[in-house]
């Protein structure tokens, strides 16, 4: 089932023209709701710089551009990038491989990847690369298909993935085999806790996740360690301090009532 990186890129080149329409059909419109949660989790502001990795046609990048955020949509499928650039000429689309990102260290205030990490040939390398290009204290948000937590829901969903989805793909996509591969790659993908462990191994801090649609999708969040400014960092430094500052705190007396 594993595909080489060039086969993955070619597959996305092929599905690019109808990618967004097919996505909407196969997810029964749920992708819009999932994307909203990702943008909320990113919590970025105008003027900040965001990396949207494996951005494809840029649908996952659009909300940032619309909010005045400097978003870079990076992907290695030129077919997907071309469709995106035609639709949104105002967004910066950059060709790049997730395992060898063409950006300097500490470039982005936050990084995100939606429904793409699973397709990257070496996902752990991509996690390390996103850590490298994100600024210390910057955030990472990943949206990816995951494991439904309730057994009955998991069985129904697996049936949908393995039977209904390929049948619908035959009707709506020019490359139904691609959707068989995508369904199989969802089944083979690690569950929520496993992905959280990968993030920690890669060096990300404060790793948490939230299940959407009963765990069909999980949104993982993490922070790059090393921020040295802001009130939270000040409070942390104070708590860790055992010298004169700690002494000073013990000597503070309560005002008389
Ligand atoms: C399912 S699409 C997701 C697109 C977009 N993020 C979205 O939410 O609609 C997955 C994307 O991952 C890209 N991709 C897979 N492996 C990659 C890699 N090694 N480097 C860059 N992009 C990659 C594919 O080209 C494809 O556009």
Image (spheres, rainbow, N blue to C red):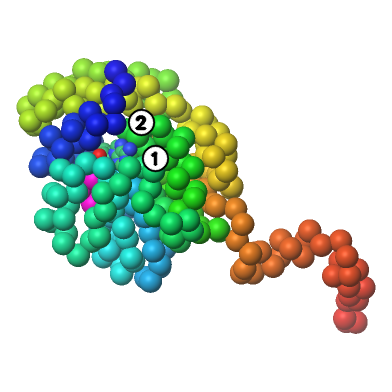
Residue 234 location in percent, x, y? 69, 67
SS label for mark 2: loop
- Horizontally, is 195 left or right of 37 in the view? right
Residue 122 can be seen in this image: yes
Please name the residue shown 57% across and 43% down the image.
Answer: 203
SS label for mark 1: loop
How many other residues sit within 10 Å of disc 1, few (<14), some (14-19) or many (≥20)? Answer: some
Does label 2 point to a residue whose CB lies under 8 Å from ligand 1? yes
Whether the magenta-drawn stretch holds residue 58 is answered as yes
Along the line of sight, the residue nearer the viewer: 250 or 92: 92
Please name the residue shown 34% across and 48% down the image.
Answer: 53
Query: In the rendered image, which quarter is residue 62 located in?
Result: bottom left
Residue 190 location in percent, x, y? 44, 27
Quadrant field for ligand 1: top left
Please name the residue shown 63% across and 64% down the image.
Answer: 228
Along the line of sight, the residue nearer the viewer: 127 or 45: 127
- The magenta-colored residue range is 56-60
Does label 1 point to a residue whose CB lies under 8 Å from ligand 1? yes
**What number is the disc on residue 227?**
none
Residue 96 location in percent, x, y? 30, 47
For the N terminus, give its image quadrant: top left
Query: In the rendered image, which quarter is residue 44 located in?
Result: bottom left
- Residue marked by disc 1: 99
Looking at the picture, does residue 32 appear above or below residue 233? above
For the C terminus, give its image quadrant: bottom right
- Residue marked by disc 2: 121
- Horizontally, is 113 left or right of 175 in the view? right
Q: Main secondary structure of the magenta part?
A: loop
Residue 252 location in percent, x, y? 89, 75
């Amino acid at each position: 089932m594993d595909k080489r990186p060039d086969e993955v890129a070619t597959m996305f080149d092929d599905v690019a023209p109808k990618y967004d329409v097919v996505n909407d059909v196969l997810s029964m419109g749920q992708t819009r709701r999932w994307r909203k949660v990702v943008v909320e989790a990113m919590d970025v502001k105008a003027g900040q710089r965001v990396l949207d990795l494996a951005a494809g046609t840029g649908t996952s990048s659009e909300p940032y551009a619309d909010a005045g955020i400097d978003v870079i949509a990076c992907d290695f499928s030129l077919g997907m990038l071309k469709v995106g650039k035609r639709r949104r000429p105002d967004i910066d689309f950059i060709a790049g491989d997730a395992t060898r990102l063409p950006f300097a260290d500490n470039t982005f205030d936050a990084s995100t990847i939606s429904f793409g990490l699973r397709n990257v040939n070496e996902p752990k390398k991509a996690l390390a690369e996103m850590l490298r290009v994100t600024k210390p204290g910057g955030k990472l948000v990943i949206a990816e298909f995951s494991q439904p937590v309730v057994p009955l829901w998991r069985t129904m969903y697996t049936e949908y993935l393995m039977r209904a989805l390929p049948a619908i793909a035959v009707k709506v996509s020019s490359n139904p085999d691609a959707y068989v591969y995508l369904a199989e790659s969802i089944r083979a993908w690690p569950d929520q806790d496993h992905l959280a462990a990968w993030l920690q191994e890669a060096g990300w801090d404060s790793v948490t996740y939230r299940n959407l649609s009963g765990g069909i999708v999980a949104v993982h969040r993490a922070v790059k360690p090393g921020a040295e400014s802001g009130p939270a960092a000040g409070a942390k430094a104070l708590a860790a301090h055992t010298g004169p500052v700690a002494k000073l705190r013990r000597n503070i007396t309560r005002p008389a009532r």
